[in-house]
Amino acid sequence: MFKNQLKIAWRNLKNNLFFTFLNVFGLAIGVGGALLISLYIYDELSYDKMFADEALIHRINADIKFGTSSNNLAVVTPPMASVLEKEYSEVQLATRLRGWGGMLVRQTNSTKNIKVNGNAFADPSFFKMFGLGLLQGNTETALQEPNTIVISESTAKTLFTEEQVIGKQIVLDNDEVYTVTGVIKDFPKNSFLRDYSMLMSMASNPNAKEVTWGSNNFSTFVKLNPNTNIASFNKRLQNVFTSYVVPYAQKTFAPTMTVERFKSEGNSYVFSTIPLRKIHLHSDRVAELNPNNSIQNIYILSFIGLFLVVLASVNFMNLSTAQSLKRAKEVGVRKTLGSSKYHLIKQFLIESGLVAFIALIFAVLVTFLALPYFNELANKSIEIPFLNPFFWISLLVFTLFLGLLSGSYPAFFMSKFKPVTVLKGGGKTTGTGGKIRNGLVVFQFAISVFLMGSTLVVFQQLQYIKGKDIGYTKEQVLVLDDVYAAGEQVTSFKQEIEKLASVKSVSLTSFLPTPSNRTDQSFTVKGRAVEDAVVQMQKWDVDEDYISTLNINLLAGRNFDPKYKTDSTAIIVNETTLNRLGINPTDAIGMALVDDSDNIEYKVIGVVKDFHISTLRNTIDPVSFRLSRRVSSKLVVKLSQGDFAKSIASMAGLWANVASEQPFNYYFLDDSFNDVYKAEERLGKIFIAFTILSILIACLGLFGLATFNAEKRIKEIGVRKVLGASISNIVYKLTLDFLKLVAISIVIAIPLAWFVMTKWLEDFSYRIEINGWSFILIAVLVLIISIVTVSYQSIKAAISNPVKSLRTE
């Protein structure tokens, strides 16, 4: 019986190839798009779950508000780990990581460096904390001694030709010699350690031994005992502030500070924990070890995936019911010959299941072909788990369920046809059925309009970011990286670069106004009461050409001048620093600021206009410049208009003269700036891709309803033509009904998109105002798309021969 019904289903699909194609195409696109999103979400939710006891591992955060300054930090002070391990019974183990960026690395018997990105200092307990083993070396001793290092497997293969590398020595940044004491397998891509290649012993970092509670630089992880009450533990963490932070402040810069006074003045210092498994999607703090995603993006993509499936299902329903009048006589004949309602429903559901199965094959094919482009778009390396039987079973069950669910309404709808009515040429649908179909079309287009509006706002915000005055010039600025590899010749290299005709100015520095893991230093205004004299600000080492090279505006005072010996203890601050202290720029000149970390007194000689040093999600923080003659890592070159490739080639030649065996690394500052917003750009492009899919599926649904409507009203159209109605009049009347539905969807979707995207924009400290005209443009575009979609069926119905449609009357 089933085999026979399957043959009949296949024959029916072949006899209606056009609608079969539309059904299969719609379901395949919907399921394929949802499958891509599901693979992406599965990958995102898998982060950091590969570590042993990951459910017990938490990171310590610090939220500090002092005066008008506030910081949400992913790092804490050096002694925090030791205190937690010794004084908190809930803590089994504590370990620290100190991110250190890229480094130049070479063997001791070579002068040629390679650049290794992603390095950190780590405590000896690091391996025990995360349950990690070594391919070579002993986890218990690998990071015990100073100047010892564990390198990744890929780094070992790059540096050495030998397989066994334990005991080998390497030189970091042309400075210190480290002994390789371990080789570790490359960290997984879905790990917070994914970009790290070398782990240096924490004993090699002099700052790790400090007992200061005023400098937050260390990512600190704790493994808690099972069944620890997290809320209670977080509450007890505040004792660290009372017992350690306040006494440190009293000793160094605020002798009269008390806990009560600190809090009464509106300040706060709160420690908290975040589970390791939640960091990737729930943490966006200062000094994260790696850029994280946002759970909001996961929610958005989940809804898009769900919408695609629902759209495809709705489309299937509408296209199936559109064929109902064509199959009405078939139903009448079957019922006359004895087919029960149950058998008819079963037959139609088998057809739906068959369509779904065919769509599944094409959906997997679409996913396979689209995955490389999607990976590039999303910056992922996702693979389809072809060898996982659970994947195939789940996908098959889901798709068949979707097909049967989508086909259930048409099946029950058509099984209700009365034989006498349909065999006489009737078979008109009920008002309730029409309302349901219309509602489904409204729902489809509401989703599409919502996605279009959201996508537009994302791109408008990105354009605003890229075009906003950020307080410095990023265009035509070339950054030569790792120039310290030239050693003492870096100054002469700078001088040679300055002689190039295409070069306007050059500066040596280690700091750029782009997001980085920089931390604040505490400064006190000499001669003022402590309660209004402290400011947390960043301290950048620059040279006298930095301000002019980046075209930063000097509001008051002067720039650094090597002719003044006193400039070695001079400092230039930004507007925000003075705003926090309540001082205007002209009054600040000559003011003395004491660095609380080393007690050095600096004299303010200049004030620069505020410029952005992080993303536009954040407000501008206090920043200061200090004149430094220390070896810097970057040479910032302002270029004039011209052939950039030729200029870079000239610089590469000059570099070869001073450091022929060292890598010549460079990038443009505006590219570095744009990289910060890659996540938003990727999200925007993903929005565009799936918005196009949703519109395509919605148009298929609208086309199906137009077909259904034309079939249903064929006799009405015939009567109108006989009575003298013109083709244009009929097309207008048929089209107007659909435009009303689309207009309703626009009215529903635009306010919703406006509300949701207003919330999304709140994450940015600097943002656009949503423009109503943009949404009007979207509305017009959607109406045009709708007219084009239904016009074919409307015109076809309007030009049909009325004699043919009325011959049964």
Image (spheres, rainbow, N blue to C red):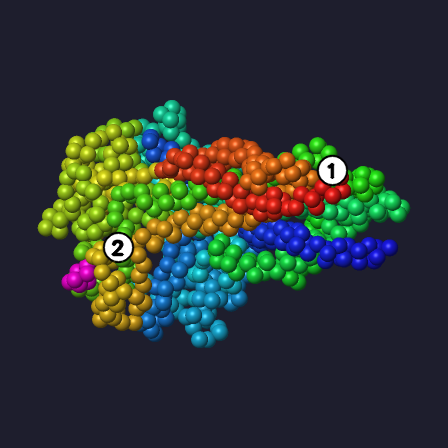
Q: Which residues are magenta?
A: 497-503
Where's residue 682, x and y in %? 46, 50
Residue at 68% x, 56% y: name it: 17
User: Is 507 in front, or is 95?
Assistant: 507
Report if residue 501 lies within the magenta region. Answer: yes
Q: Is residue 752 visible?
A: no
Report if residue 580 lies within the magenta region. Answer: no
The residue carrying mark 2 is 477
Residue at 40% x, 38% y: name it: 764
In whole angstroms, how far apart are the C-alphas of marks 1 and 2?
71 Å
User: Which image quadrant for residue 630?
Assistant: bottom left
Classify mark 2: residues with Cα within 10 Å, few (<14), some (14-19) or many (20+): many
Q: Nearer the viewer, mark 1 or mark 2?
A: 1
**Residue 167 sits above or below residue 199 on the image:** below
Classify mark 1: residues with Cα within 10 Å, few (<14), some (14-19) or many (20+): some
Where's residue 18, x and y in %? 66, 54
Residue at 30% x, 54% y: name it: 669
**Residue 322 sits above or below residue 152 on the image:** above
Element class at badge 2: strand
Element class at badge 1: loop
- Per the rendering, the mark at residue 428 is 1
User: Is 723 in front, or is 358?
Assistant: 723
